[in-house]
Amino acid sequence: MRYISTRGKAPELSFEEAMLTGLARDGGLYVPATVPVMSRGDIAALAGLPYEEIAFRVMRPFVEGSFTDQEFADIIARAYDGFGHDARAPLVQLGPNHFLLELFHGPTLAFKDFAMQLIGQLFQSALAKRGERVTIVGATSGDTGSAAIEAFRGLEAVDVFIMYPHGRVSDVQRRQMTTPDESNVHALAVHGDFDDCQARLKDMFNDFEFRDRVNLAGVNSINWGRVLAQVVYYFSAATALGAPHRSVSFTVPTGNFGDIFAGYIARQMGLPIDRLVIATNQNDILHRTLQTGAYSTRGVTPSISPSMDIQVSSNFERVLFDAYGRDGNAVAQVMDELKNSGEFTISQGAINMLRETFQSGRASEQETMATIKDMLARTGEVLCPHSAVAVKVAEEHLGDEPMITLATAHPAKFPAAVEEACGIHPPLPARMGDLFARKERFTEVDNHLAALTKLISDRISS
């Protein structure tokens, strides 16, 4: 399996090389040169299997040539051993033909654990074979950072630096990043929003002298390994509800487009997905883009669903690559327009492809709060604000086939918003009961590339 850049100028890489590289040197994102297709019989055979076995069968073709079957099976087993539910990603029925896919049973109570725990084990195995050390830098709107720190804390071959927007994540999200005491963990509170953090991360990857000197690696959703791990739960959920013998649909709360792009890959692999519905909060750039055909940033308005407070959706570039017929030059051109002016217009052929592939909706703050209250009354289910955004949008897109809505975080990660909406203060699991008693350790830093690269260089050399 070979991987190519969405901008067409970087060399093809193996899975292991693409994973360790993260962002391509031409500024693009790596995608498979071809997407393997599973037969109807192979998909049907997934029904009833343990999550780890489904993960092995779905992901194996993508890692061909990088790990032996036994190595890969052992990596998967270690990745999901610490999850708090035997099913890993259980389904809960909300109503007729509407199901909630609970993705918050991992170590940090968010869907990012499915990818990050796997990435941590993949990195550890690959670096041990290579005898190398890397510096991981990530940007987070809340959940990626804590999941990355949990996956890489204490590993000898890795220093991990996580940038988060100072004052714009929940208290639980922040403490999950700032309370680990391992010396290889560094939480950086950046004065800016998530888009600023993400922009500085891309700047670091494009500073080749710094990138090579510190052996920079990325674990944001720009990393193909992250997307690949998320493909698995589309298969586990769909086959549990009768696929491939009937189609299913998914509604996904998303800001950075990675989670719903994983669903797009699952459909390309042959999973019978009828509709992929993008759910956005008030920072609704993805919904606006599908409606208007223009990608135009407006700045971020803080919300009660902060992990979706994004205007520059990095993974959108991956689907644009397909929408433009895999023309790397065309993708590079619109990405340059976005960088220079904050907007670009999608060609008619490309927007037609996107509208045929995805549907979308948005939820205001008031609608999100109302959905949390309503779902508790109707079903007894307590939703986090991100999951509530998705449920609200899903209810507007219900059809004859089962609709599976992704619940991306545990409500206890956003207790203030949940309590205001429905009167219940969701408790943390017992294993995290002392989170607010732990000592915090973080560094505030200005939103400047030079300040960040100097801090990182000083920390890894001390």
Image (cartoon, rainbow, N blue to C red):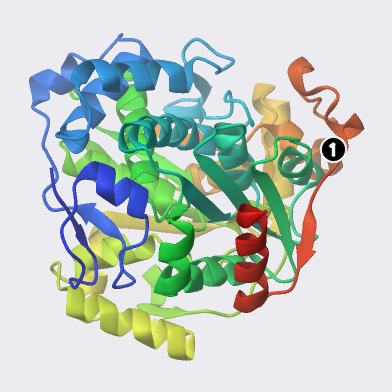
**Foreground pick, 457 / 13:** 457
Q: Quadrant of residue 110?
A: top right
Residue for point 30% across, 28% down: 235
Relative to residue 300, is residue 199 drawn left or right? left
**Foreground pick, 371 / 446:** 446
Q: Extreme front residue here?
A: 462
In the rendered image, is residue 162 in sight?
no
Q: Quadrant of residue 23?
A: bottom left
Residue for point 20% across, 28% down: 60
Residue at label 1?
419
Residue for point 23% across, 43% down: 15
Q: What x and y, as percent, mark residue 310?
A: 57, 64
Circle 1 — which element?
Answer: helix
Q: Extreme bottom residue here?
A: 341
**Count of marks overlaid on the render:** 1
Relative to residue 166, is residue 434 drawn left or right? right
When the figure is inspected, residue 152 is found, relative to residue 159, above or below; the finding is: above
Q: What x and y, as percent, mark residue 10?
A: 21, 68
When the figure is inspected, residue 15 is found, relative to residue 318, above or below; the finding is: above
In which quadrant of the rendered image does the N terminus lie? top left
Q: What x and y, as percent, mark residue 119?
A: 42, 36
